[in-house]
Image (tube, coloured by chain):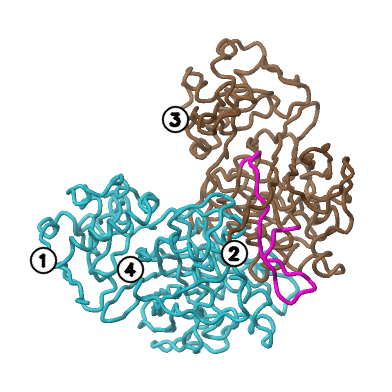
Chain colours: A cyan, B brown
Amino acid sequence: MEKLTSWVEIPPNSDFSIYNLPYGIFSEWLVGTQTTAKATQTAEKARVGVRIGDYVIDLKAVSELGFFDDIAFDKNVFQKNVLNDFIILGKNIHSQVRNRLTSLLLRGNESLKNQADKVLVKVENANMHLPVHIGDYTDFYSSEEHATNVGKMFRDPANALLPNWKHLPVGYHGRASSIVVSGTPIHRPWGQVKPADQENPVFKISQMLDFELEIAFVVGKETALGERVSTSEAEDYIFGLALFNDWSARDIQSWEYVPLGPFLGKNFGSSISAWIVPLEALEIFRTQTPTQEPAVLDYLKFEGLKNYDIQLEVMIKPQHGETKKVCQTNFNYMYWNMCQQLAHHTVNGCNLRVGDVCASGTISGKEKDSFGSMLELTWRGTNPIAMPDGTERKFINDYDTVIMMGFCEKNNIRVGFGEVSGQILPATAFKS
Amino acid sequence: MEKLTSWVEIPPNSDFSIYNLPYGIFSEWLVGTQTTAKATQTAEKARVGVRIGDYVIDLKAVSELGFFDDIAFDKNVFQKNVLNDFIILGKNIHSQVRNRLTSLLLRGNESLKNQADKVLVKVENANMHLPVHIGDYTDFYSSEEHATNVGKMFRDPANALLPNWKHLPVGYHGRASSIVVSGTPIHRPWGQVKPADQENPVFKISQMLDFELEIAFVVGKETALGERVSTSEAEDYIFGLALFNDWSARDIQSWEYVPLGPFLGKNFGSSISAWIVPLEALEIFRTQTPTQEPAVLDYLKFEGLKNYDIQLEVMIKPQHGETKKVCQTNFNYMYWNMCQQLAHHTVNGCNLRVGDVCASGTISGKEKDSFGSMLELTWRGTNPIAMPDGTERKFINDYDTVIMMGFCEKNNIRVGFGEVSGQILPATAFKS
C-alpha cells in the first residue's frame, strides 16, 4: 500500500497525519490579540474544524466553497459551536465527509489547495473549545492493573479485586458540567478530609491532588429508553476517541466515597482533549484483548479485535522547572473494551444520547512506570517521584501542568490525539 | 390575613390553589384525538404553562395578550419546550411574573377572565412534557432513617450509619438522560444478579424492582467552575421543587455497587412530576430541621428554618386491582437540608447549571409505614404488603403503577405537587 501524502506540509512525527483528520471546535484568535480580553479573542464564532499537521481546516469555509455540495446533509452543522449536530448525521455522512477531505488534501489535488488561504487556519491562531455538548458522563474502571493497585492499597492485598470486577465493567456516573477542554486551568479543591489520627473530619485544601490517565469515547448515535446495544453493534454507537484526565482529590474521595461512590473528590473538574479522533482513523491499530477468565456472561461476549494499540504518556511540567515524563503505558492493557462497556451500559435499557462521554477509567500497565495515576506511581506517596529541578512529587503541586499524550503508530503511519493538558492553580480563598 | 380566591373554579383540596402556581411544559391534545398517533397528539407545540385548579394557564397566550408587557424580559421564553430559558431570567423576573399572575387570577379582576377561552386549557387536554433540560442529576442520601434502615439490612445493625454520614450530605451523580416525566411507563430492567447460593452471577430480569420516594429541586442559577455557594446564599440557586421517583433494581444494585456506587440498578429510569413548585410558594410551610449532632463543619452551618412540611404518600395501583396506600411520610424528616446539599455540592468548586436536578434521596420517617421504599417497607421482602385484591407485594410487579403524591397544608392553604406516577411494564424480549 502506497503511503498517502498531502499538499499540506505535515511535520515528521505529527499526530495529525492525513490518516487522522480528527474533529474539533475552534474559533480564531484575532491576529495579534492573544493577550487582550477574552471577548476580543473569541470574536470569531466557534465552528467545526479538522486538524491536519499544524493547521485547522475550517469546515464551514470548505463547505461554503461548495466542496460538500454533492453530499446530502445540512451544511449548517459546521457553523455550530459543538459537534453534536454533525455527529447526529451518522456514520454514512461522516465517512463521505472524511473521504472527501482525504481526497481534497492529497498531494496532486489542486482544488482545495488553490483556496488554502480561505480554509486553513494556523493552530497558533486557533482557540479550541469543548468539542461536544456532553449530556451524561460515565466513568468506567476497566484496567485490571489499576483496580488491583487501588485494591491493594485501600483494601486487601490478597483479594485486591472485588468479586464483581471480572464479571462486569464497573462504572459510575460522573459530572458533565465540569468537563473542560485541554488547556483550561483547574483550581485545587477544598473539601472534607478525615485524618487517620483524628476522630472527626477537617475542612481543608486537598493535599492529594491526582490525575487519572484515561481514554474517553464520544457516543455517536442515540438509543431510546429500554433499547439495548449489543457488543457487535457497539462500534456503530462510537463516534470517536479523546484523551481524558479525570482529576481526583484522593483525600476527599477516600472519606466521602462509601457507600455511593466518588462525588466531590472528582467533580471539581475533568479535562478532555480538543480533538476527537474518529473510530475509523483507528481501524488499522486494532489489537488483541486480554483473555477474560472467568468467561463473561453472554451479553458481554464479543468477536474480533476490540482493543486499540494507543501509546500513552504523562508529563508533569512544574511552573519553572523542566518537564518530567512520569508514566508510559498503552490503551491495549484494558481488560474491558469499549464494546463491552456500551453493551453493559445499555443492557438495562439506559438510553444514550449523542455527545455522551464514556471514559475508560485509569489506564495502568504492569510495570511501575506504566501506572496512570500518582496514587499508584508513588504508591500513595510512599515512593515520591524525583523531578529534574531537585523537588519531588507525591501528588500534583500548585502551578504544575499535567500533560497527557497519546498516539498510534504502525507501518510508518501515525495517528495521534495531541494532548490533554491542565494546570493546577492554588485553591481560591475561602470566605467563611 | 384574608384568604385569596380566584375567578378560576378550584376544586376543594386541589393541590393547585392560587398560592401555588407551579410551572410546567405542556402541549395540547387535539380534542378527540387522545387515542390517535402521538404525532397528532402533540401537533400543538410544547410551551410553558402554569397550573391552577384543573386548568393550565398558557403563558405564551397570556404574554401575547400583553399582560406582561411592562415586565422587561424576552417573552420568547414562554414558547420554549423546556423551562430553562425562563429560569435563567432570575428570581426578580420570576417574582414579577408570579405577582402579575396572582393579581390576574384574583376574584374580581376581569381583565384575564374576559380572555379565559384564549388562555385556559383543561388539564385533560394538556399533554405534559419533561419540564426542564437536565444538565446533571445528583442524588443525595439525606434521610437518617433511610440510611439507617439500609445500613441495618446490608451492613451492621449496630453501626448502621457509616462514619461519614453525619459529617456530610452523602451524594452521587445519577443519570440525566433517563429522567422521564410523570406518566411515562418504564420497562423492568435485565441485569447481572448474584444469587447468594451461587458462585457466579446470572443474567436475568430484575426481581426486586423498587421505588424511592424523593423530593427533587431544580437549580435556578448557574455558577462558574471554582465558585462556591454558601448555605445562606443557597436558596437563590433553587428555582423550585418536584416529586421524584428514583426507580431502583435492588438485586442489580447490590451486586454492582462496590466500590464506585449504583449504576445500572438506577439508571434505567427516574420519574419527575410535571409541575415545578417555585420555592416562593413553599415559604409559609418552612419548618424546623432536626438537630445535627455532632456539630457540622462551618461550611455546612446554617440559620433559620430550612426544612419544609410536605406531606407525602405512595400508592401502588395494580393493573386491575384496587389502589393501596403503602407509605405516608413527610419531607420534614430530612437530616440534611437543600441549602446544606448545595453548599456541599459546590464547596470544591463544582459548577451548577440552570436545570440541574438534585434529589433528596429516599425519604423515610420513623414509623414502619413511613418508609419511602419497598426495600424498607417489606424489610427486604421478609414482610410483604397485603394488597386489597388478595395478592401481596415484596417489590413492584409488572403492570403496577406507583403513584407518589405530596402537598403542604397550613391555615387552610394548600400547595401541592400533584403526583409523579409511572407504570412498570414487563422486561423487553432479549435477543441474544
Distance between the alpha carbons at the discs numbered 1 and 4: 22 Å
Residue A316 visible, this orientation: no
- Whether residue B232 is in magenta: the answer is no
Position of residue B368 relative to residue A187, above or below, is above
**Labelled pair 4, 2 in contact (Cβ < 8 Å):** no
Distance between the alpha carbons at the discs numbered 2 and 3: 38 Å
In which quadrant of the rendered view does residue B412 lie?
Answer: top right
Badge 1 or badge 4: first in the primary sequence: 1
Q: Please give the chain letter of the residue carrying mark 3.
A: B
Mark in the foreground, 4 or 2: 4
Label 3 belongs to which residue? B76
Magenta span: B181-207
Distance between the alpha carbons at the discs numbered 4 and 2: 28 Å
Q: Please give the chain letter of the residue carrying mark 2.
A: A
Q: Position of residue B60 (x, y in %)?
A: 50, 25
Mark in the foreground, 4 or 3: 4
Position of residue B269 relative to residue A20, above or below, is above
Label 1 belongs to which residue? A108
B142 left or right, relative to B370: left
Mark in the foreground, 2 or 3: 2
What amino acid is found at the position of numbered circle 2 in the picture? Tyr
Tag 1 and tag 3 share a subunit: no
**Residue A281's disc number:** 4
Residue at left offset 74%, top offset 42%: B401
Label 2 belongs to which residue? A172
What amino acid is found at the position of numbered circle 3 in the picture? Asn
Tag 1 and tag 4 share a subunit: yes
Position of residue A329 relative to residue B316, above or below, is below
